[in-house]
Amino acid sequence: MSHINKLLGFLSFSSVLLLAPTQTLFAQEVAEARAIEEVVVTARGREENLQSVPESISAFSAEQIERAGIKNFRDLADLTPNLSQLDNFRPGLSRIQIRGLITPQVGDPPLAFVVDGITASDLEFINQELFDIERIEVLRGAQGALYGRGAIGGAVNITTKKPTNEFEGKVSASVASGSDVRLSALASGAITEDKTFFRVGAYSRSFDGQLNNTFLNEKVDFLDETSVFGMLGFELSDRTSLALKGRISNTESGLGYYENVSANTLEDFSIQTQHNVPGQDERDLTEFNAILSHDFAASTLELVAGYSESDQTAFSDADYSAIDFIEDPANFIFHYPAAQENILKVESTTFEARLKSSGDTRLRWALGAFLQDRTRDSVYKNYDDFFGAEPRTRADFDDSVLFFSILDDNSSDAWALSTQLNYDITDQLEITGALRHDEDTRESFDSRDKAGTFAEETFSETQPKVSLAYQMSPETLLYAGYSRGFRSGGFNEPSPLTNRSFEEEISDSLELGFKTTLFDGRGTLNGALFSIDQENAQITRFNIDSFTLENISVDDVSSKGFEVEFAFQATDQLSLMLNGGKIDSEINAFGERPDLIGSSLPYVAEYNLNAAAEYEFPLSGALDMVMRADIQHTGPRIFSFDVPDIESTKKTFVNLRVGIEAEKWSLTAFADNLTDERQVEDLFLFGDGVTDLARYPNAKSQFGLEAKYKF
């Protein structure tokens, strides 16, 4: 651990270096600072200046992604107001919250996740390594009219880097705490100049883990991942282009490392995992897509096709303990001794057609059509484990000790039509109108008894959006808007002990916002007030009777809040960023649990604040030093309707990065979660709700070094 201690000391000293110069830097003439670089986004389907778009958007450029160390969706959420992600059970799952709208654990996320125009069909395809990214845009507020069903709380629009005639290559490697080794490489260039292009890359990660199973004396949060991707681009003519892309990933990881705690020991992290069955998850992801684009005289046509597949198998302890039930039968009250297996296969095909006007005209329009077919087949098996105090593996369980199983063949057949108009009433006043109709037919049955378990229902909604934007001055934009979002209903796993179906969810959002450019272009200040009404808000609960998860609907929930983002180029060397959001979530009606009226939805933090300072200065003519500090502060949240009086405390996380950059290489030392702040990621009732809870812990602090070389 001596090298870690040295690195920690180095990073702590570097943070002092980062903060100390600000005293003199602010004393310099403001005129020395350069203007903030203009940010271009494609949130509305065409390239626009971020400050001119009447939407609440956080945007991250390739340089910002690299310098902030954004490697996955969680890193992105940590830097965005009113957006968060919490981990639970296994890596393919994540609880995403945006403006108070949450992810049911066995349902769809509250936002659309779009990569190069392809909308992810399932949560399984969101939690991956973000690699070779050009730009990320996070839109907050219902975006159903622009991005379709699922975008009830917002959308994430990701653009990957594209190949050009110029050959480029890049390799990177990092080592960090927990024997965490990451390697990546990519190459890009032209096969035939101006005609045919390629971009290929690979990524791997090997992580031994840092969290302990004290019963088995082994790490529980290990992760081994490999991924390869490739792209071919063809300029078929001066007006027509074709892009073919593919990505294949394999992940093996720990899972389900819940810790048994009580209400009094909720945040006592000296309590660690004690399972007699180690958890292991294996997941294979395959994604292919094609985009054909053709420019007409006054419009552009895009045809998009995508295929995605996820195969996942998980085995773990089901009672999350290593208790001797024979010697202490009383433990049966709260812990039925068992192991569990989860098998999931998701497969989808997506087709989209988009026709949009081109050119800088007063009237801009777009038309779209969407088709998506998805199957989501799952198997849950629960095995008796009467020797709960003995180490066991998957090989120790077979059908002779199978307690029960649930099979669910679940499918979605969806289509949509959309239109969008942007019209400049005057040079200063723009009105935007958009409309999309989505229809989603879902089926569910147990293949062992299809006739007895078959269920089918069609969920549909027309989603309007309207906004008015007033460019009060070249530096100030004011806007107001209304939008509707829609998340399909569906079916829980066929079981006589669970509710068979859950309702579709609708969100209606009102927003007032402003965007300003300050200090002669050296700063921006953007903010918004919002009000959201949710009908049939979806949430997942643990059904102790069936020992499975089920979705239920909260009749009516209202959320009100605000968010603000400030960026300031204080000098040529120093950049400052500050953003935050506040959410007041309240249940207005809940027929199943009227006692919860007035409570907030679980997993919604009351507020979050993010601050960053980035200082860059030359060491020599060819070398620069870049230092960055990020601080994230999050308010309290509850975790379960079953234990609504139990909530987390406030949490503060600190990340530091100190690097040396040259034209072709860089070397960066980093500390993630510098102070080793611990928090509860997931919590559910596993007994009486007071003395027996299952807690999922967050990742511990990490210290490491990262090297990159371009050629």
Image (cartoon, rainbow, N blue to C red):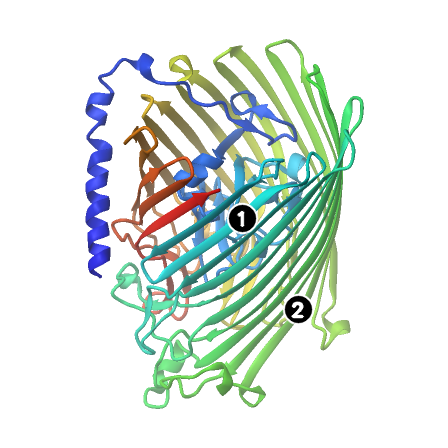
Q: Residue at x 20, y 22 (%)?
A: 24
Q: Residue at x 34, y 47 (%)?
A: 636
Residue toward you, 599 or 185: 185
Please indicate whether residue 226 sits to the left or right of residue 427 in the image. left
The answer, for residue 81, to whether it is visible in the render is no
Of badges 2 and 1, the one in the foreground is 1
Please indicate whether residue 247 sits to the left or right of residue 103 in the image. right
Estimate the x, y position of residue 456 in percent, counting from the top left.
75, 60
Residue farthest toward the right in the current orientation of the protein: 297
Q: In the rendered image of this protein, does residue 303 appear above or below residue 85? A: above
Q: Dot 2 corresponds to which residue? A: 408
Q: Quadrant of residue 114?
A: top right
The answer, for residue 205, to whether it is visible in the render is yes
Tell me the amino acid under the disc marked 1: Leu
Please indicate whether residue 64 sits to the left or right of residue 227 in the image. left
Q: Quadrant of residue 248?
A: bottom right
Say what secondary structure mark 1 lies in: strand
Q: Quadrant of the N terminus?
A: bottom left
Q: Dot 1 corresponds to which residue? A: 186
Do the residues under discs 2 and 1 have CB atoms within 8 angstroms? no
Estimate the x, y position of residue 673 in percent, counting from the top left.
31, 49
Tell me the amino acid under the disc marked 2: Asp
Q: Residue at x 41, y 35 (%)?
A: 663
Q: In the rendered image of this protein, does residue 255 appear above or below residue 622? A: below
Disc 2 from disc 1: Cα separation:
40 Å
Estimate the x, y position of residue 132 in percent, counting from the top left.
53, 44
Q: Quadrant of residue 465?
A: top right
Q: Residues within 10 Å of mark 1 (few under 14, many from 20)?
A: some
